[in-house]
Image (cartoon, rainbow, N blue to C red):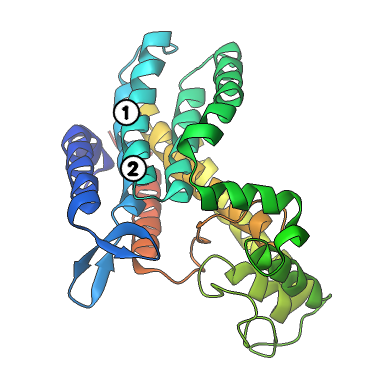
């Protein structure tokens, strides 16, 4: 198998390639549901933004891994710029949900590299201060409506708040043990939209109840803990940074999708890794796990 360092050594080429593909998508990509996110490849539509998460993890691990000691403010600024460029391209599609998953990659790798807590606090403050500007000039109307209806879904129960209300009904109807496999009404009768993608966890809760939810979350927790162990045992900082970068995006996506499916977060087009329907998402997730296993299996090699 190929050593993970072969990928990080070529990370700048991989990074430039993914940026070129993201630009191509904006110009020539296939459009669907008001967004231009895919490249048609015969019977298969490729979504490059899914692979951007891995590319950002690779380039940040390589860049910050070569710095001696804690990263300086200029180093963090460069790392932030490396993250922001694909973030902006993906958000332009528009796909703000996938774009946001790049932020945990940067924060996770930078924190492990030794970013000071006061710098993290400054970043958090900057995000808070930028929120009104983003609301005024960056967010589209449908994105604003998702935030507003999250606070009060009943004000547009048949429109923007419909998905959130139905998600809560779906989760609550499962009870302790659920209605049984494919015996649910909300999912099977399509009262809840996007049951194969964004709200697959809501369907799991309806069909298998609280018990099924606990089992699923336990499996996700097991994967996360094992990945953290791989980062701890990595032979070098490069491997640790790479593992944490991949894991940060994965963990954020799991947490957000689960809370969204329970009606506890605004509706966003974020799939649930390993469960939601989607070829590009599955391939990118498994590729990320491949890198994590690659780091772990080489912990005793020179």
User: Which residue is identified by label 2?
Assistant: 298
In the displayed structure image, the side of residue 128 where residue 273 appears, left or right: left
What secondary structure is marked by label 2? Answer: loop
Residue placed at 56% from the left, 49% from the top?
224
User: Which residue is identified by label 1?
Assistant: 82
Front position in the image: 114 or 199: 199
Front position in the image: 6 or 27: 27
In the displayed structure image, the side of residue 85 where residue 11 appears, left or right: left
Front position in the image: 138 or 8: 138
x and y, in percent, of residue 59 in the image: 29, 32
In the displayed structure image, the side of residue 59 where residue 165 appears, left or right: right
Closer to viewer: mark 1 or mark 2:
1
Number of on-image labels: 2
In the displayed structure image, the side of residue 68 where residue 183 appears, left or right: right
Location of the C terminus by quadrant is top left
x and y, in percent, of residue 57 in the image: 36, 38
Residue placed at 84% from the left, 75% from the top?
176
């Amino acid at each position: 198998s190929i050593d993970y360092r072969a990928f990080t050594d070529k990370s700048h080429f991989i990074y430039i390639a993914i940026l070129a593909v993201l630009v191509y998508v904006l110009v020539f990509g296939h459009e669907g549901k008001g967004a231009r996110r895919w490249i048609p490849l015969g019977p298969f539509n490729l979504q490059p933004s899914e692979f951007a998460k891995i590319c950002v993890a690779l380039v940040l691990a390589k860049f910050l891994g070569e710095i001696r000691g804690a990263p300086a403010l200029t180093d963090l600024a460069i790392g932030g710029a490396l993250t922001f460029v694909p973030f902006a391209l993906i958000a332009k599609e528009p796909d703000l949900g996938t774009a946001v998953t790049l932020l945990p990659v940067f924060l996770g790798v930078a924190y492990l590299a030794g970013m000071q807590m006061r710098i993290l606090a400054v970043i958090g403050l900057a995000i808070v201060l930028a929120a009104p500007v983003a609301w005024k000039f960056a967010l589209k109307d449908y994105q604003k409506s998702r935030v507003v209806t999250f606070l009060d879904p009943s004000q547009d129960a048949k429109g923007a708040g419909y998905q959130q209300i139905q998600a809560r009904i779906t989760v609550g109807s499962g009870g302790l043990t659920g209605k049984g496999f494919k015996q649910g009404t909300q999912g099977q009768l399509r009262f809840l939209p996007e049951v194969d993608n964004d709200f697959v966890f809501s369907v799991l809760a309806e069909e298998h109840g609280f018990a099924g939810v606990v089992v699923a979350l336990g499996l996700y927790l097991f994967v996360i803990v094992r990945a953290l162990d791989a980062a701890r045992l990595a032979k070098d900082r490069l491997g640790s940074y790479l593992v944490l970068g991949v894991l940060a995006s994965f963990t954020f996506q799991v947490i957000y999708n689960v809370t969204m499916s329970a009606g506890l977060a605004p509706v966003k087009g974020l799939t649930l890794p390993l469960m939601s329907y989607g070829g590009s998402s599955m391939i990118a997730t498994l590729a990320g796990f491949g890198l994590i296993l690659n780091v772990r299996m080489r912990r005793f090699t020179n």
